Image (spheres, rainbow, N blue to C red):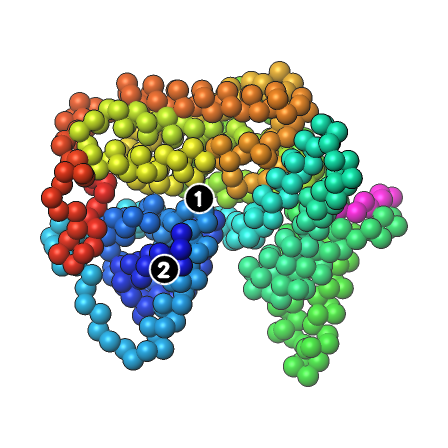
């Protein structure tokens, strides 16, 4: 996408979210532009969904516009620049993007009602979001290093370019050897402390010299406690720092506060947190491997079937530190390939919807445009544009995910353990990141088999059980977008592509 197209997308979004004066903050994650709003009622949800570049919207603690991986990183700077330019210019009254109709108001009211139900932000969910904010910025490095590690393993097995192998190993392992430092830095930043102090305390965990410390008759090992220890150490440092800011005189603050923060938090980390976090990390790894080794098929069924609902509730964020811990311990997370089956069920369900509604041209067009992203593991377009609004296809998509998860879990139970060397990608994009004990061929074949099972079961369950007769009557109507005489509003705003 060119710069002009990125700017055009940003310019199309801005008035539909209430203009620059309605925005209080701007950020983005892997796939979504996240904005905080002064007045939620000014947002035109349906018009936003109708924009060609917008894959969906999510109303949560921030308003989230799904643009997809790659695109969001290019559109966000343009959006920020437009907001800054508008605020620096003389204020002018922006005309409404399109006339507000009774149908618009009814749709907006329904959206607000649903958003209010979804916004029951409990302390637990808010805490999970903050934990996710610590790890999400690390995902690009995890992906890059994971792919390089996979390439290094392939070259090693083939015996090619032996001189390059040590270099690739160093590149792939360097980040993982210091990931605790990055976790500590992000933790302090997220919870309101000084980021560099959080990183300094977390660095103690990976310092080789800790091997010389013997407390309680137990020897420490560099890296003991991993990312969980780093998170706990940095969080403690935040509270120590805040306590110091309250009690230390301003004239001594610059000297005393950082010293006490690092000293107190460091001692507690060395003589307490590293042991506790090490035991917790070992328990997580042992439990995950035991779960799949002893009840892999059933565990895969449950994990694959429930992952989409977990995403809807925001509870999937609790898995991010678990994935990272498993990668740190074993080199890969055994959970991610199973959870990726949820996306396969989603793709199969969307294909079934496509064939069950042959006369609904707008919905079929949405599915055709979203399927390539779905195959690559980007599920938001299909979830928010197809299955979730329809209801029953969302359930049958979960059934497909459960079947694929059971297939992959069964092979874990039979002793063929494998996982992903990074978190973030899913679907076909996960192939380069797979690693296991039984060789690349078997690992890739089992994962591909799981995807195929997810596609087929998701398709079959949706085709036969995804619609009631009334749903088919209401949805299977002649709406061919190629023959529609009018595809925009009077103001040039594209009309909704998906039926309400």
The residue tagged 1 is 314
321 displayed left or right of 258 = left
Is residue 322 among what the camera can see?
Answer: no
The residue lying toward the viewer, choosing from 208 and 212, is 208
Q: Determine which quarter of the picture holds residue 150.
A: top right
Prevailing secondary structure of the magenta residues:
loop
Q: Residue furthest top?
A: 414
| Numbered range of the magenta stretch | 215-223
Q: Is residue 388 above or below residue 295?
A: below
Q: Residue furthest front?
A: 161
The residue lying toward the viewer, choosing from 388 and 87, is 87
| Residue 350 horizontal/vertical position (percent) | 32, 30
| Residue 314 horizontal/vertical position (percent) | 44, 44
Q: Earlier in the sequence, mark 1 or mark 2?
A: 2
| Residue 490 horizontal/vertical position (percent) | 13, 56
The residue lying toward the viewer, choosing from 129 and 3, is 3
Q: Is residue 336 above or below residue 120?
A: above
| Residue 56 horizontal/vertical position (percent) | 33, 46
| Residue beneath the point at 29% across and 80% down | 90
| Residue beneath the point at 57% across and 24% down | 444
Q: Is residue 454 above or below residue 111?
A: above
The residue tagged 2 is 4
């Amino acid at each position: 996408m060119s710069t002009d197209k990125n700017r055009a997308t940003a310019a199309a979004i801005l008035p539909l979210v209430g203009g620059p004066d309605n925005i209080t903050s701007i950020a983005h994650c892997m796939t979504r532009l996240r904005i905080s709003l002064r007045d939620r009622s000014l947002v035109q949800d349906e018009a936003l969904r109708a924009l060609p570049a917008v894959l969906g919207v999510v109303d949560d603690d921030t308003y989230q516009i799904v643009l997809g991986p790659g695109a969001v990183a290019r559109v966000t700077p343009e959006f920020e620049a437009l907001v800054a330019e508008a605020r620096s210019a003389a204020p002018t009254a922006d005309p409404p993007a399109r006339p507000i109709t009774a149908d618009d108001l009814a749709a907006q009211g329904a959206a607000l009602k649903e958003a209010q139900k979804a916004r029951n932000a409990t302390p637990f969910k808010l805490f999970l979001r903050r934990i996710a904010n610590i790890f999400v910025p690390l995902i690009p490095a995890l992906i890059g290093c994971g792919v390089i590690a996979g390439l290094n393993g392939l070259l090693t097995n083939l015996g090619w370019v032996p001189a390059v192998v040590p270099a690739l190993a160093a590149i792939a392992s360097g980040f993982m050897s210091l990931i605790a430092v990055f976790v500590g830095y992000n933790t302090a930043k997220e919870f309101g402390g000084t980021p560099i102090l959080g990183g300094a305390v977390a660095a103690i965990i990976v310092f080789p010299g800790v091997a010389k410390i013997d407390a309680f008759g137990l020897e420490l090992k560099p890296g003991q406690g991993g990312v969980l220890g780093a998170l706990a150490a940095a969080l403690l440092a935040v509270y120590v720092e805040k306590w110091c800011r309250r009690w230390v005189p301003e004239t001594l603050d610059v000297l005393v506060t950082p010293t006490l923060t690092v000293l107190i938090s460091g001692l507690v980390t060395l003589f307490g947190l590293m042991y506790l976090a090490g035991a917790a990390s070992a328990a997580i790894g042992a439990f995950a491997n035991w779960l799949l080794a002893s009840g892999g098929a059933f565990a895969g069924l449950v994990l694959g079937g429930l992952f989409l609902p977990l995403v809807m509730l925001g509870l999937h964020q609790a898995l991010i530190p678990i994935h990272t811990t498993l990668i740190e311990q074993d080199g890969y997370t055994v959970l991610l390939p199973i959870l990726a089956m949820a996306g396969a069920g989603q793709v199969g369900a969307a294909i079934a919807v496509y064939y069950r509604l042959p006369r609904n041209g707008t919905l079929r067009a949405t599915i055709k445009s979203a399927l390539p992203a779905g195959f690559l593991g980007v599920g938001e377009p299909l979830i928010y544009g197809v299955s979730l609004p329809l209801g029953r296809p969302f359930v049958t998509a979960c059934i497909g995910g459960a079947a694929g998860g059971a297939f992959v879990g069964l092979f874990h139970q039979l002793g063929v353990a494998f996982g992903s060397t990074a978190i973030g990608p899913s679907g076909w994009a996960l192939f380069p990141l797979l690693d296991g004990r039984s060789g690349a061929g078997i690992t890739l074949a089992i994962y591909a088999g799981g995807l195929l099972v997810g596609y087929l079961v998701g398709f079959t369950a949706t085709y036969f059980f995804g619609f009631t007769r009334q749903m088919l009557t209401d949805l299977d109507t002649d709406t061919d977008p190629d023959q529609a005489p009018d595809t925009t509003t009077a103001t040039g705003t594209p009309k909704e592509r998906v039926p309400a």
